Amino acid sequence: MRIGRQVWDELVAHLKRELPGEGVGALLGRGQAVRYHPLQNIAMDQTHFAVSPTEWVSLLHELETTQERLVAIVHSHPSAPPVPSQEDREQFLYPESNLLIVSLQQPDKPVAALYRKIGNRLERQEFFTI
């Protein structure tokens, strides 16, 4: 998967603003990620994320209008590596999309990993910024 450099920079800036909690958003496009859509984390603690059902449905309606697709669901791990937690594995329900986890253990040096659901497993995928 390809992510435009400006999109990547917007994504990282948003996730850093959400520290010390987890940030969440969506990468949108047609094939490659051409747009980042920040989402509000409504989780009550800083080590989880949850998106308002109303905000999520609104995003899905927007995708119908723009004819874009959900390229990846994005969230940060403020103090952990970009490896899916048990909760990440259980809650990722979009096999037609990807899961991008960005570790902000060192906020000035974000480390990211992309995963795709294949069967019951999340398998690591390649991505790069352009």
Image (cartoon, rainbow, N blue to C red):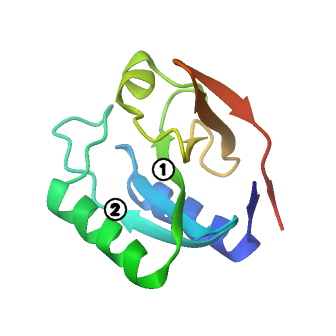
Does the rendering let one see residue 52? yes
In which quadrant is the C terminus drawn? bottom right
Mark 1 or mark 2: name the one nearer the start of the chain.
2
Left or right position of 40 against 128: left
The residue that disc 1 covers is 73
Residue found 41% across the figure and 66% down from its top: 38
In which quadrant of the rendered view does residue 91 lie? top left
Q: Secondary structure at mark 1?
A: strand
Left or right position of 21 against 76: left
Residue found 42% across the figure and 34% down from its top: 92
Does the rendering let one see residue 82? no
Q: Residue 106 location, x and y as percent?
A: 63, 40
Q: Secondary structure at mark 2?
A: strand
Cα gap from disc 1 to disc 2, whole angstroms: 10 Å
Crowding at label 2, few (<14), some or many (≥20) Cα neighbours within 10 Å?
A: some
Left or right position of 35 against 15: right
The image shows residue 92, relative to residue 86, as above or below, that is: below
The residue that disc 2 covers is 39
- Return the residue found at the far bottom: 65
Q: Residue 56 location, x and y as percent?
A: 27, 60
Tell me whether the residue at label 1 lies in contact with that at label 2, contact meaning CB atoms closer than 8 angstroms: no
Q: How many marks?
A: 2
In this view, the residue in front, 65 or 55, is 65
Q: Residue 127 location, x and y as percent?
A: 78, 49
Q: Residue 122 location, x and y as percent?
A: 59, 25
Instruction: Give amino acid for label 1.
Output: Ile
Question: Which labelled disc corresponds to residue 111?
Answer: none
In this view, the residue in front, 78 or 43, is 43
The image shows residue 99, relative to residue 32, as above or below, that is: above
Instruction: Give amino acid for label 2.
Output: Leu
Residue found 42% across the figure and 61% down from its top: 17
In which quadrant of the rendered view does residue 90 lie? top left
